[in-house]
Image: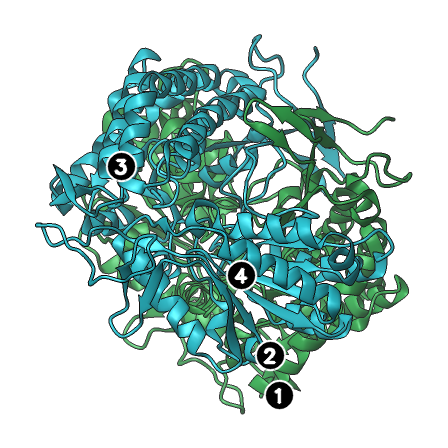
Chain colours: A green, B cyan
Amino acid sequence: MIRSLDARSGKLVAEVAQETTEAEVGAICERAAATAGALEDLGRSGRARMLDEMADALERRRAEVVALADRESALGETRLNGELTRTCTQLRFFGEVVNDGGYLEAIIDHARTTPAGPQPDLRRMLRPLGLTGVFGASNFPLAFSVPGGDTASALAAGCPVVVKAHDAHPATSLACAEALVEGAGRAGAPAGVVSLVFGEPAGVALVRHPATKAVGFTGSLAGGRYLFDLANGRPDPIPFYGELGALNSVVVSPGAAVGRSGEIAAGLAASFTLGVGQFCTKPGLVFLPRGAAGDQLLAALADAVRALRPGHMLTERIADGFASGTAALRRLPGVRVVAETGGVQVVAETGGVDLAGVTGQTNGGERAANGARAGWLGAPVLLEADASALTTPGSPLTDECFGPVTVVTRYGGTEQLLTMLADLPGALTGTIHAGEDEEAFARAVLGQFADRTGRLVWDGYPTGVAVTWAMHHGGPYPATTGPLHTSVGATAIRRWLRPLTFQNVPQQFLPEELRDEPAPGYLVPRRVDGRLELPAG
Amino acid sequence: MIRSLDARSGKLVAEVAQETTEAEVGAICERAAATAGALEDLGRSGRARMLDEMADALERRRAEVVALADRESALGETRLNGELTRTCTQLRFFGEVVNDGGYLEAIIDHARTTPAGPQPDLRRMLRPLGLTGVFGASNFPLAFSVPGGDTASALAAGCPVVVKAHDAHPATSLACAEALVEGAGRAGAPAGVVSLVFGEPAGVALVRHPATKAVGFTGSLAGGRYLFDLANGRPDPIPFYGELGALNSVVVSPGAAVGRSGEIAAGLAASFTLGVGQFCTKPGLVFLPRGAAGDQLLAALADAVRALRPGHMLTERIADGFASGTAALRRLPGVRVVAETGGVQVVAETGGVDLAGVTGQTNGGERAANGARAGWLGAPVLLEADASALTTPGSPLTDECFGPVTVVTRYGGTEQLLTMLADLPGALTGTIHAGEDEEAFARAVLGQFADRTGRLVWDGYPTGVAVTWAMHHGGPYPATTGPLHTSVGATAIRRWLRPLTFQNVPQQFLPEELRDEPAPGYLVPRRVDGRLELPAG
C-alpha cells in the first residue's frame, strides 16, 4: 500500500494507491507507447500548446498541489509555491524550445559528385526515442517529479512518459498527474501521454519493460546504480540518465577569505542548509585557507550554523540516513564538529533521530498510533576534516551526505589544494570565491573543476539551478550516469531523441522540416551543405 | 604473439608484436591521458592542422599501407586504395567540423531578472570527455580501424586515443599508427595522442582502465556486448559506443518488382556481396512481393548470384562463422537455397570451409606448414525463407549473418509485410524500392523503418556510407549500443564531448568562444539569449 504521510508528524494521512503490479505496469506501458503517434501528429506547435495547457492546469490546482506537497515534504509553502511556478515555467520553456526547432539538429547534404564518386542526397533530423520512464525525486516534489524537467523535456521531444511516483509524495504525484492529463486533453492529446506507477517493484518493471526506450532518474547513488545496471542488463539495453549525487566543492581563495569572510560565511550557511540540505547541488565540501582569514571565516560560518534551527526532513529514511551518515563522519579520525544547531541529538546506536524540539531536551522519539515517528528533524552540522582524512582512499568524506551538513578542509598552499581537488569524484558543480588579483590561483582551480564537474560557479553558491538555454546540470560519475547530457535546461531534450537520416527520399515522404521548401511554421535552423542557416525573420 | 597472416593463403607472414600486457596498457593509457592538455592547447585550428598532417602522412605511405592491408584482409587493392582515400578525406573532414565550431554547441544566457528572481550569467560549451579507447574493425582495416572515424572524431574533439588493433590486420595497424604519430609530430602534438595496444586481454584492460573515459567499437554482437557490459560494470561506468551488427532489410514494392526487376536484382546481388558480404550495412533480408513480378526478380537475383565467384574472407574465424551460420540457416524448416555460387562446399559438421577452387572439386583444406588453412573462401548464397520461419520467435533469420548471404522472404499484402517489419530488431538501415503510384505503401513501410533503423534508403542499397554532415550510422539495439549517436559523419564528434557551464565566470577565464568579444578565429555559431547567431562573414 502506498501511504501519504505528514512529513512533520510522521502520521499516516491517507492510503493513496496500491503498489502497481508488474502486469499493470505492462498494460500502462503499452497504453503509453501507443500514444507516440498522437504526440508526433500534434507536431511541434501542438506539443508546445500541450505543455502550456499542462502548466495552466497545474496553476489552476496550485493551492491543492502546494498544500499536498507541503504536507508530504515539509518543505514549506513559500518554497513550494516557488517550485510550482518554476515547474510551470519549465513546461512552457520546453514549448519554446520545441517551437524554435533548433533541437532537431536538421542537416541537409544535397546530392553531389565527389572525387570518390557520386554522393546521395542525405537529410538528417532527430526523432523521439519512444516511451520514457521517469523516476520522481524526493527533494523536489514538483520540479523533479511528475511534472518536472524529465517529463517536460520528454513530452516536448514527442515521447510518452510513465512516471514512477516517489513514495515520499504519492498524493502530490497523483494531483500533478491529473493536472497533466487534463492539460493533455485540452490540447487534444490522449490521456496516456503521462501515466503514473507506484512502488519500487513497479519501478523495476518500468525499467525492464520492452516498450520503455529510455529512463530519467534523480535520486540516490545506490538506487540509481541499481536501476542503471538493470537498464544496461536488458536484452536490449536502453539509455539511463541518472543524477545520483554530488559533493559540490567550494573553494575560498586566501584573498576572498580576507575580503569577504562575513558574506561568504552567510552565503555558505544558507546554501548548505537550503531545503534542509536536501539539494543535489548542496555544497558538501568547503576548502578554506589556513591562517587568520580562514579562521575568521570558519568562526563566522560556525556562528551562522549555531543560529539556525533544525528542519523537518523529507522522510524517515532520509532523516535516518542523515543521522547515521553524520554520525559516521563524526567518528572518523581527523574529523571534528565545529558547530551544530541545537535541539536535536543524534542517537548513533539506533541510527535514529530523536526529537528535542526547541527546548533542547531530548525525548524518546514520540510515535504516532500508526507506528510512524512523530517527525524527522535534521539539525545543521558543520564539520572540519584534516586534509589527511579527506585524502584517505575510500573516505566517506568524499561521498555525498544528504542533509544539512558540510565539511570544511583547510589548505596550506595552492599545490596542496590542487592535489586534493584532483582526487575528488565527479560532481555537478565546482565553486570558487577569489579576489581580483588571484588570477593564477583561480585559473588552476577552475581547471581542476572543469575536468570533474558540469558547472563552474564564480563568487556564488551551487544551489539554485536556473532553467535556461545554457544551463547544464550533470557531471562525471557519480554525479550522473550520462555525462554527455543534462537534466535541466533546454538541451535536456537531447536525451530523448535519436538521429534518422533520409537517403534520396522523395520530398513528400520527408518531415516538413527537411523539405526543400518547408511550409510556414516549419522553418528551423538547418545546416545545408555544411553551412548553418537560420530561418528568415 | 600477434601474427600477421596472408588472408589469401592463411600463411604466417610476420610476428608483429607481443600481446600488450595489462601493465603496459596502464602505462600507455597514462601517457595518452597526459596529452589531453596538449590537444586542448593546440586549439581547434591546431587540431584541424594535426588531422590534415595525419592525412598527408597516411597518403605518403599509401603504397605500403594498401599492400599490407591487402595482404592481411584480401579485400583487394582497388577497394583499399578507395578506403585509404576515404580515410584521409575523413580525417580532413573532421578538421572542417572542428574549424566550423558549431559542434561546440555554444550557448550564452546573459544575467537577467525574472519574475522568480535574478538569474546569473550562464555560458555553456562542450569540452572533451578525455582518453578514448577505440576498437578497430576487421572489415575496414583503414576507415574503421586505427586511422578511422572513431579516431578522427575523438582527436578532433580533443581526446587522446588508444586503439586496440584488430588481430586481423596488426601490420596495417602498426603502419597506420606510425603515420598518425608522424602527422601529430608535424603539427606539434605529442606522440602519445595516438597509441596502439594488441590482443584481447589488452582490449579488456583498455576498457577497464580508470583513465579511459569513453570507448568506440565496431565489431560483433558477442564481443561488443561483452565490452559494453564491462564498460557499464566499472566502478565509474563510461559511455560505450558499439556498432554491433544489423540485418538491414530491403523492401521491394509490387510496382518496383514489375518495373525494375533486372536493375534491382543486379543492385542487390552487388550490394550483399560487396567486400565478400563483410559490410555492417549488408542487406541481409529482402522482402519481395508474391506473384509473377516477384518470381521474376528472384530468378534474376538467383542468376546474378550464380554468376559470382567465391571471395577470400577476412579471417579464418569469419569464414568459419559464415560457413556455420549459413549451414544453420539452411537447416531451418521453411528455408530453401535459391542459388549459390559454385566452387565451395560447406562442411557443416566441422563448421569449416573446404577449398574447391574454381574447378568445383573439393579438397580437404590444404594447410600451410604453420597449421593455418590455405585460405578462407566465402561463396555467395541466396536463401528463401517462408514468412512463418522468419516470424518464429528467436529465429536466427533475424540475426546478422556476416558474409555473402541474404535471405528473401515473400509477402502477400501490405499488412503482412508491415507485421513482419514490426517484429524485426533494430538495424542501421531500412531500404525501400517503390513505384511512383505507391505512396501509401511507401509511407507505411518508411514508418516502420523509421522506428527501427537509423537510415532510410530510397531506391538504392544500404552499402556505402558517405562521410558527410548529415550521415547517420547507428540505430536501435543491436545495431548500436548508443542509439543517440552516430559513428560516421560530422556529428560522430558528439560522442566524445560533454557540456560544461560557466556561471558568472569573468571573461578572462572563459574559453575564447564564450567571451563577449571572441578573438578573430574564435567566432562560432552561438545561441545568445535564446537566439541562434551565426558568425559574421
Residue bearing mark 4: A217
Query: Dividing the picture into quarters, in which one does residue A206 lie?
Result: bottom right
Return the disc, 2 or 4, that comes first in the chain's sequence. 2
Return the disc, 2 or 1, that comes first in the chain's sequence. 1
Front of the two marks 4 and 1: 4
Q: Is residue B395 above or below residue A279?
A: below
Left or right: B142 with respect to A197?
left
Q: Residue at x 47, y 55 (%)?
A: B481
Q: Are marks 2 and 4 on the same chain?
A: yes
Residue type at mark 4 is Phe
Residue A18: give its label.
1
Q: Do callouts 3 and 2 mark residues in contact (Cβ within 8 Å)?
A: no
Residue A198: give its label.
2
Q: Mark 1 to mark 3: distance in Å?
A: 67 Å
Q: Are marks 4 and 1 on the same chain?
A: yes
Residue type at mark 3 is Arg
Q: Secondary structure at mark 1?
A: loop
Return the disc, 4 or 1, that comes first in the chain's sequence. 1
Using the image, name the chain to which the residue with label 2 belongs: A
Q: Are marks 2 and 1 on the same chain?
A: yes
Q: Secondary structure at mark 2?
A: strand
Using the image, name the chain to which the residue with label 4 belongs: A
Residue type at mark 2 is Phe
Residue A504: give x, y in percent of width and height. 71, 41
Q: Residue at x 56, y 57 (%)?
A: B303
Q: Do callouts 2 and 1 mark residues in contact (Cβ within 8 Å)?
A: yes
Q: Is residue B382 above or below residue B276?
A: below
Q: Mark 4 to mark 1: distance in Å?
A: 22 Å
Residue B81: give x, y in percent of width and height. 41, 28
